[in-house]
Image (cartoon, helix red, strand yellow):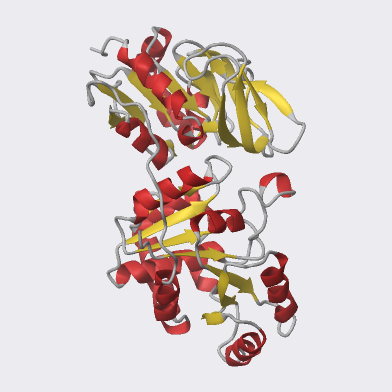
Amino acid sequence: MKLPRIMLAAPASGSGKTLITCGILKALVNRGFRTASFKCGPDYIDPMFHSRVIGTCSGNLDTFFTEPEVTRYLFGRAARETEISVVEGVMGYFDGLAGISMKASSADVAEVLGIPVVLIVNCRGLSVSLLPLIKGFLEFETPTRIQGIILNQVSEGMYPDLKRLIEEQFPLKVLGYVPRLSDLVLESRHLGLVLPGEIEALQEKLNRLASVLEETLDLDAFLAMATGAPDLEYEAPKIPVLQNPGSISVAVAQDEAFCFTYRDNLQLLEEMGARLVTFSPIHDRELPKGIQGLILSGGYPELHARALSENTSMRASICQEVCGGLPCIAECGGFLYLHESLEGEDGASYPMAGVLEAGAYRRERLTRFGYVTLKALENQMLLEKGEEIKGHEFHYWESESCGDSMRAKKPLRKRSWECVHGSETLYAGFPHLFFYSNPQAAWSFLRKCEVTPCLR
């Protein structure tokens, strides 16, 4: 299919990728384009921000989680409904697994998708030294997919000279510059916690940013570069489907405390025939009626510990049903909620659902961070003994009991550890799972739901 697409990458984190990506997306939406956005890597926050505030269809692209043919399918499925897709890279362009490999890097994703790349270069403190930096990125891997350059933190007066120097030296199109925008910084809090009251202010900020970029970037050339991407072939993977699609209802936690859920995970469950019902552990009084399964997503329960604790009827409902055998997947924040107690961000300890006889508490730094491959050490709901699924961890909170039914191993490293409370009806642990890394796990969950009586 002809799928116009383009990637915004950079030599390193902190180069301005997210700010510029958000501004370009907003400008395209304001122009009336049906736009899709993607984030390389496992990050939930940027896609959530793009979807809620900018209003684009957004998802993840991750070549650690999925093989090339599946990556192309996940991209193509979303991109075919839009007029242009913008992919934001992760870290530096060539930075991949374990810090020692290009696997799962932005460059790897670009190669799998055949996507033109625009390199965002932070010019603060640089002038002619830009040239060897760009030369290195063009020649490190050949042929290169880098076709364009955006110069960040450049003055209007200096830009024409830098543009001339670059285009005289390299077969690249310099697509414009971004001046220093001290009043248009998107703080990390906003990217992590988009609250209803903040959206209006963020919309105003993004509209001002989009207006600036309309003046300083050649967005018509940007669109032409995306349109010049080669045709992309992809095929839907074969997945099992319930004999009676829609006959199984799965409740999915979705509110301020539980907001980290991969779109592709939910879509896979729906394609397998599940009916998804959203609910709020903060605002609803009990689990939805008629469900046969439960997903407690990741998120920020520690920020809402008091509200979650004060909803005693919901805590009792979840404890009763999960302990009674309702199939449940609880990842990271959802895992914390199943504990007897949780230390909130305010330092106080709050009663939680009480499914697990343990407490959860805050650490001062990231406890475990990054990709993992999980191997089942025993038969359980999602996996048979010896089977594997991929995921990632990112959390400051720790548990007194992380479980021991799976072994997590870091890719390209020797480090591993036991984790996850797994049983015939439960997956509860810190790792966030990506179902397309092993669709059989999602199918096993639904088959267990299929034989579970509906919640009355």
Give percent across and percent down for residue 185. 52, 66
Judge from the rendering whether residue 182 lies leftward or rightward of residue 364; answer left or right: left
- From the viewer's perspective, tell me whether residue 87 is left or right of residue 53: right
Residue at (59, 56) in percent of width and height: 106
Residue 79 percent across, percent down from the top left: 36, 55
Q: Nearer the viewer, residue 426 or 125?
A: 426
> Does any portion of residue 297 appear in the rendered image?
yes
Q: Is residue 427 above or below residue 191?
A: above
Q: Residue at x 40, y 49 (%)?
A: 234
Residue 72: percent from the left, percent from the top? 45, 49
- The answer to which of 292 and 255 lies nearer the viewer is 292
Number of residue marks: 0
Q: On the image, which quarter does residue 456 sit in?
A: top left
Residue depicted at 72% across the width and 66% down the height: 140
Residue drawn at (39%, 80%) of the image: 220
Q: Is residue 405 above or below residue 13?
A: above
Whether 373 is drawn above or below 32: the answer is: above
- Residue found at the very far top of the displayed protein: 324
What percent of the width, then of the height, locates residue 64? Answer: 58, 42
Quadrant of the image for the N terminus?
bottom left
Res 307 → quadrant: top left
Residue at the extreme right of the image, as rendered: 414
